[in-house]
Image (spheres, helix red, strand yellow):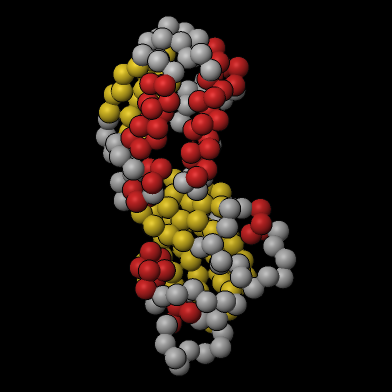
Amino acid sequence: MRIDLIELLNSKELCHPTKINFMESTFERQFRIEVSGYPWWLGNSQTPSEGKICFHIEDIIEGCVGAEVICRDCSEEDLENLSANLLAEQEWAKGVQCEIFCSSPLADPFSLYAYLDDYLGSLSCPYSANKYLNMGHEKSFSNFRNITLEKRYLLSNAPEKICVVICEFLKGQKVDFNVIKSKDISGDFIYLTLGEGYFICGKAYATY
């Protein structure tokens, strides 16, 4: 049987023991995880004591597997932090894509970086502040400092929710800026997490 992963996790309560048997990249931009353990996905009182299920992640845009999943011990709770939701529902991904252009220097760029990084962490965002701030091609703090000393520069390219937070900081620093809004790029992508790892993909489903 094949079922959408978001639908499965919303309709069935995940129960342990669960143990990852193997993970593999099957084709380009595809990943597969086989799990054995209590067959919670069947969701009825007549379930056998053990079963297997495969999670298929396809059309992957980006992602990574957490080290704790690869270097796990004898734990039987490998799926403890498994989740799947629409990317557009994530607090840090909400709104249209925005660019912030500044027309005066930023006195303390490192405070902005720390402020934004703390905010992203509070939302369990998989990215750090350098994902959204203009730190040059090398993504270095020295580049970021030099860029923000200019009279005119692109400060950030980020979803609207994050731009609102950056703009509030800029107002407090009395920095002149303009915001240009573009289109919503979250689309129908799926945001899947497993441990400390994550995937942003076009499809995620289970077979059993």
Count the marks: how many? 0
Task: Residue at 40%, 15% (x, y): give it.
Answer: 174
Task: Residue at 58%, 74% (x, y): give it.
Answer: 18
Residue 183 sits above or below residue 135 on the image: below
Residue 135 sits above or below residue 49 on the image: above
Task: Residue at 38%, 46% (x, y): give it.
Answer: 91
- Which quarter of the picture shows residue 79? bottom right
* Residue 41 percent across, percent down from the top left: 45, 78
* Residue 51 percent across, percent down from the top left: 54, 82
Left or right: where 184 falls relative to 136? left
Looking at this rendering, what residue extends furthest in the bottom direction?
A: 46
* Residue 110 percent across, percent down from the top left: 56, 23
Looking at this rendering, what residue extends furthest in the front direction?
A: 172
* Residue 10 percent across, percent down from the top left: 38, 69
- Which quarter of the picture shows residue 203? bottom left
Left or right: where 99 falls relative to 66? left
Residue 3 sits above or below residue 32 on the image: below
Foreground residue among 190 and 23:
190
Task: Residue at 50%, 48% (x, y): give it.
Answer: 124
Viewport quadrant of the N terminus: bottom left
Looking at this rendering, what residue extends furthest in the top direction?
A: 151
Say if residue 149 shows up in the picture.
yes
Foreground residue among 173 and 7:
173
Say if residue 29 shows up in the picture.
no
Residue 48 sits above or below residue 175 on the image: below
Foreground residue among 4 and 91:
91
Left or right: where 93 falls relative to 150? left
